[in-house]
Image: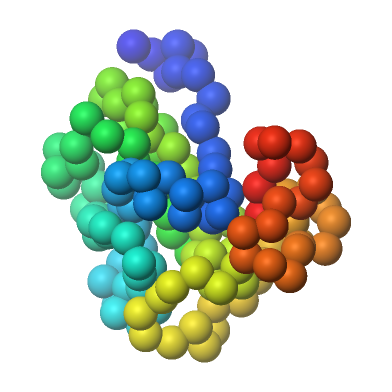
């Protein structure tokens, strides 16, 4: 498979991620260990594989379940998502807006949310103000996220 053969990566918002994680998906955190120690994803099964070690450790990611890759910088986890897709993973997806939106939605974390800020955290996927309720959609339809 060449890079040209890869489809667009599936991207899901933290709200959809939270639902999928509740249904058995695995969250793969691609941040570095010091960042994970400061603020971690909680309330779900998390496998931490730093992007810096991803080429050596990607085989730890199961192929038989949905996998959501996340980072503080979503473009980093998107790289890991495409890497897995290139390896034949069909159930890998990237969390849009990453940790900042996860925290902004009020989803569980370990450690402190101090320093976890982003302009993306305060807006929704539809460029409207994000809803106050963590599980509320942005009004963009049944597949909308926030």
Q: For the view shown, which residue lies furthest in the right direction?
A: 128
Residue 89 in view, yes or no: yes
Q: In the rendered image, which quarter is residue 61 located in?
A: top left
Q: Quadrant of the N terminus?
A: top left
Q: How many marks?
A: 0
User: Where's residue 138, x and y in %?
Assistant: 76, 51
Q: Residue at x 45, y 11 (%)?
A: 5
Is 74 displayed left or right of 92 in the figure? right
In front: 23, or 106? 23
Q: In this view, does 3 lie above or below 76?
A: above
User: Where's residue 133, x and y in %?
Assistant: 68, 67
Is 32 displayed left or right of 139 in the figure? left
Q: Which residue is drawn at 54% across and 25% down?
A: 8
Q: In the rendered image, which quarter is residue 40 located in?
A: bottom left
User: Where's residue 6, x and y in %?
Assistant: 45, 18
Q: Is residue 101 above or below residue 2?
A: below
Q: Residue at x 36, y 29 (%)?
A: 91
Q: In this view, does 72 lie above or below 51?
A: below
Q: Residue at x 37, y 85 (%)?
A: 111
In front: 28, or 18? 18
Residue 50 in view, yes or no: no
Indicate how the structure is coloured in the image.
rainbow
Q: Quadrant of the C terminus?
A: bottom right
């Amino acid at each position: 498979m060449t890079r040209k053969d890869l489809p667009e990566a599936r991207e899901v918002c933290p709200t959809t991620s939270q639902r999928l994680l509740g249904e058995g998906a695995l969250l793969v955190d691609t941040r570095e260990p010091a960042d994970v120690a400061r603020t971690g994803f909680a309330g779900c099964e998390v496998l931490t594989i730093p992007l810096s070690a991803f080429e050596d450790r990607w085989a730890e990611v199961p192929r038989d379940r949905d996998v959501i890759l996340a980072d503080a910088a979503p473009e980093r986890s998107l790289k890991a998502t495409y890497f897995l897709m290139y390896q034949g993973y069909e159930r890998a997806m990237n969390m849009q807006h990453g940790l900042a939106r996860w925290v902004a939605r009020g989803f569980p974390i370990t450690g402190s949310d101090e320093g976890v800020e982003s302009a993306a955290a305060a807006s929704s996927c539809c460029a409207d103000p994000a809803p106050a309720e963590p599980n509320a959609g942005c009004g963009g339809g049944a597949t909308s996220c926030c």
